[in-house]
């Protein structure tokens, strides 16, 4: 399985931007970078994904390094509701093998201070 | 869209009893996944189906675990006999695979299983 490395935890202040880093030095050319988050007592939910270019949606932005060995999930204005575990996952979106499944690591626990 | 629906939300059972967890995927999705989450092991993929056919069950821990998908709108995960170490939150997820592209997963709210 392709591997990602994330810090265990991060704290932020409400209304401020948050940058969640992810390292994936062994990423292959067919791997997409996916971010999911899991709010307390809920199932994981999709946040954003990308391949090479930076991506924006209503929830967040994804900044991907030029060499693709790292990426950053950006929450532009953190709210208390954004407190969750955020998972950075590599997946071969076009494949059918082991790397085409979503394999979750430990993720990063984001705390938001009022 | 009601999303992925799992039942029951909570299940408490005695060791040795049979447990059946149920999942209704999102209509139109053709892939279904069963995950288990514990504090020690995190989120583990147990099995997944594509077009109702089991594709990979390498994550199923033992023969006590079995999963079926009799049609596109229903799947079950059965544990028989159950053991205390099976206590966990079990999630079902569904997604679409179309024209060789795997789309994002939608997860249900999970079933919290406690085996005493």
Image (cartoon, coloured by chain):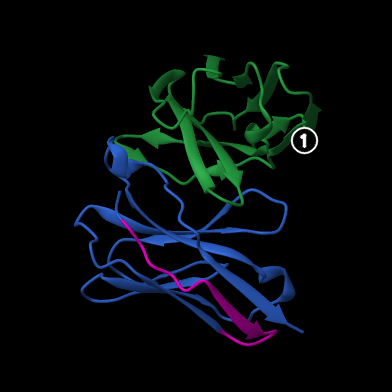
Chain colours: A blue, B green
What residue does disc 1 label?
Answer: B9
In the displayed structure, does residue B19 sit left or right of residue B96? right
The kind of secondary structure element at disc 1 is loop
Question: Does the image show residue A7?
Answer: yes
Please rate how many residues cluster around mark 1, counting C-alpha atoms within 10 Å: few if below 14, some from 14 to 19, many from 20. some
- Is B4 in the magenta? no
Q: Main secondary structure of the magenta part?
A: loop
Residue B110 percent location from the top left of the image: 68, 39
**Disc 1: host chain:** B
Question: Of B50 and A9, which appears nearest the observer?
Answer: A9
Residue at screen point 42% across, 44% down: B103
- Residue B13 vs B95, above or below: the answer is above
- Tell me the quarter of the picture where residue B111 sits: top right
Residue at screen point 63% across, 84% down: A12
Residue B99 percent location from the top left of the image: 31, 34
Residue A62 percent location from the top left of the image: 42, 71
- Tell me the quarter of the picture where residue B65 sits: top right
- Residue B68 vs A112, above or below: the answer is above
In the displayed structure, does residue B90 sit left or right of residue A54? right
- Is A7 in the magenta? yes
- Residue B19 vs B27, above or below: the answer is above
In the displayed structure, does residue A81 sit left or right of residue B41? right
Question: How many callouts does the rendering have?
Answer: 1
In the displayed structure, does residue A24 sit left or right of residue A44? left
Residue at screen point 53% across, 29% down: B28
Question: Does the image show residue B71?
Answer: no
Name the image quarter holding the C terminus of chain A. bottom right
Residue B72 percent location from the top left of the image: 54, 19
Q: Which residues are magenta?
A: A3-17
Question: Of B97 and A79, which appears nearest the observer?
Answer: A79
Residue at screen point 20% across, 73% down: A67
């Amino acid at each position: 399985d392709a591997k990602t490395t994330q810090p265990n935890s991060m704290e932020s202040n409400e209304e401020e931007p948050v940058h969640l880093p992810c390292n994936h030095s062994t990423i292959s050319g067919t791997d997409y970078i996916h971010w999911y988050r899991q709010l307390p007592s809920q199932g994981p939910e999709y946040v954003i994904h990308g391949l090479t270019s930076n991506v924006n949606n209503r929830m967040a932005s994804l900044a991907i390094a030029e060499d693709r060995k790292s990426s950053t999930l950006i929450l532009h204005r953190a709210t208390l509701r954004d407190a969750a575990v955020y998972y950075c996952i590599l997946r071969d979106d076009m494949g059918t093998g082991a790397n085409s499944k979503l394999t979750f690591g430990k993720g990063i626990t984001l705390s938001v201070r009022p | 869209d009601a999303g992925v629906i799992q039942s029951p939300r909570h299940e408490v059972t005695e060791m040795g009893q049979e447990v059946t967890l149920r999942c209704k995927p999102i209509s139109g999705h053709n892939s279904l996944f069963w995950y288990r989450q514990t504090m020690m092991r995190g989120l583990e993929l147990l099995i997944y189906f594509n077009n109702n056919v089991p594709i990979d069950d390498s994550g199923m821990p033992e023969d006590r675990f079995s999963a079926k998908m009799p049609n596109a709108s229903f799947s079950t995960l059965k544990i028989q006999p159950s053991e205390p170490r099976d206590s966990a939150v079990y999630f079902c997820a569904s997604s679409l695979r179309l024209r060789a592209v795997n789309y994002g997963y939608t997860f249900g709210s999970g079933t919290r299983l406690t085996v005493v």
